[in-house]
Image: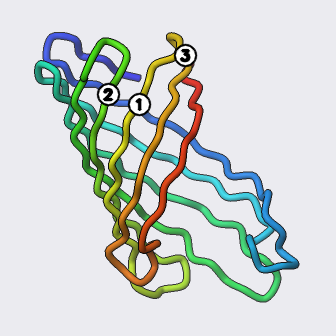
Amino acid sequence: MIDHARTGIVFDITTRLKIPTASAKQNMGSGQVDYAIQGDLYKTISKFTLSAAFGYRILGNPSGITFHNVLYGAAGLGYQLSPTVTMGTSYTMGQSPVRLEDSRDLMLYISQRVTNNFRLNAYGIRGFSDRSPDWGGGINLRYIF
């Protein structure tokens, strides 16, 4: 992570690993491991945080199907409600791994810092393409080290 405190700009590079947990036999998942590398850029202005992300995902190919590796990106805006609570929005676009319509989603979220390393997030999603969910949501617990 590169943190340029004087300008409020932070750049971070992360890797992601998706372990197959859904049943490939029931067509709920590919049964393959996926990898990604992602760059994130943040700029803080008072209580607002502007964000941008750009990534490349390497998809596992199950038997009989060829998935193409894909690019994805996002832009967002967050607002710090308190020292431990942030709310915001993010717009995400991603290439289709089977060369269909790209995904486009808008997410609204609220994030609660539980400790210095743990964040509890709740979010809702609205999709704007055939490859995106019409509506969705969830919660997650995130560990940052």
**N-terminal-most mark, 2 or 1:** 2
Q: Indicate the amino acid at tag 2.
A: Thr
Element type at mark 3: loop
Q: Judge from the rendering whether residue 81 lies leftward or rightward of residue 73; answer left or right.
A: left
Q: For the residues carrying marks 2 and 3, which lies nearer the camera in this image? A: 2
CA gap between label 2 and label 1 equals 5 Å
Q: Could you tell me residue 132's position as x and y percent?
A: 44, 73
Compared to 57, does 117 lie above or below? Answer: above
Q: Indicate the amino acid at tag 3.
A: Asn
Q: Indicate which disc residue 111 carries.
A: 1
Label 2–label 1 contact, CB within 8 A = yes
What residue do we see at 55% from left, 84% from top?
Answer: 98
Q: Could you tell me residue 26's position as x and y percent?
A: 83, 79
Q: Indicate which disc residue 117 carries.
A: 3
**Mark 3: few, some, or many residues within 10 Å (few <14, many ≥20)?**
few
Compared to 101, does 56 lie above or below? Answer: above
What residue do we see at 82% from left, 82% from top?
Answer: 63
CA gap between label 1 and label 3 equals 13 Å
Element type at mark 1: strand
Colour scheme = rainbow
Q: Indicate which disc residue 43 carries.
A: none
CA gap between label 2 and label 3 equals 15 Å
**N-terminal-most mark, 1 or 3:** 1
Element type at mark 2: strand
Q: Judge from the rendering whether residue 26 lies leftward or rightward of residue 45; answer left or right.
A: right
Q: Indicate which disc residue 86 carries.
A: 2
What residue do we see at 43% from left, 53% from top?
Answer: 55
